[in-house]
């Protein structure tokens, strides 16, 4: 399983053990699954950067599942909606050509970016999910995105307390994707 994201997945400002990717690893282990997680997330990553490095990541890690968590940095920089969509679409297509199943993590922007841009940005993720028939976490930060106490002092990056909530949001969809044949049953005692 490949986590392909930005600072929200790269443990920005928190310890690796506290990040949602580490917590997801623990959750998968507690469910006796045989998945190994590789976190190829980079703080500051954009959809264009992801598009430029997805082939190498797929070749190197050969994942069955890719959790794609990109787009927030593009939105915060006001990148064109078409560019964000096209870059994410190219990443999804690359994954699908390598027979990797994609779980797309949706994002939202603060309202100060204007209603038109924020609505179009938010719509990218369900549109891609429908077009490419991929699973979607509607909003990675659902349930706490508007609550200041779940963020670091920068007001952008979730703090350690929020990481379990992110895992819950991802797990809600991911659990439907984990193959039954990958679950290891413990021997009878």
Image (cartoon, grey):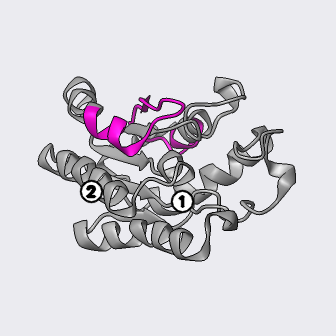
Neighbour tally class for label 2: few under 14, some 14-19, many 20 plus, Cα within 10 Å: some
Q: Is residue 29 left or right of residue 23?
A: left
Q: Is residue 40 magenta?
A: yes
Closer mark to the observer between disc 1 and disc 2: 2
Q: Is residue 188 visible?
A: yes
Q: Position of residue 187 (x, y in %)?
A: 44, 37
Q: Is residue 27 left or right of residue 159?
A: left
**Quick one: SS at disc 2?**
helix
**In this picture, which residue range is highlighted in magenta?**
26-52
Q: Residue 180 falls in which quadrant of the image?
A: bottom left
Q: Nearer the viewer, residue 186 or 53?
A: 53
- The residue labelled by disc 1 is 107
Image disc number at residue 86: 2
At x 26%, y 34%, the residue is 52
Q: Is residue 183 visible?
A: no
**Quick one: SS at disc 1?**
loop
At x 76%, y 38%, the residue is 160
Where 81 falls versus 56 (above or below)? below
Q: Is residue 183 left or right of residue 112?
A: left
Where 5 falls versus 36 (above or below)? below
């Amino acid at each position: 399983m490949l986590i392909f994201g930005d600072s929200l997945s790269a443990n920005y400002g928190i310890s690796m053990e506290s990040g949602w990717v580490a917590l997801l690893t623990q959750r998968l282990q507690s469910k006796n699954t045989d998945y190994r997680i590789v976190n190829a997330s980079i703080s500051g990553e954009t959809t264009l950067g992801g598009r430029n490095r997805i082939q190498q990541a797929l070749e190197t890690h050969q994942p069955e599942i890719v959790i794609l968590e990109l787009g927030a940095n593009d939105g915060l920089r006001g990148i064109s909606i078409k560019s964000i969509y096209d870059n994410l679409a190219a990443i999804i297509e690359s994954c699908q050509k390598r027979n990797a199943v994609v779980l797309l993590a949706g994002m939202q922007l603060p309202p100060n970016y204007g209603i038109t841009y924020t609505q179009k940005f938010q719509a990218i993720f369900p549109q891609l999910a429908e077009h490419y028939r991929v699973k979607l976490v509607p909003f990675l930060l659902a349930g706490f995105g508007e609550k200041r106490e779940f963020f670091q002092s920068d007001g952008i990056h979730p703090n350690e307390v929020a990481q379990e909530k992110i895992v819950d949001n991802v797990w809600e969809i991911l659990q439907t994707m984990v193959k039954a044949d990958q679950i290891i049953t413990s021997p009878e005692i």
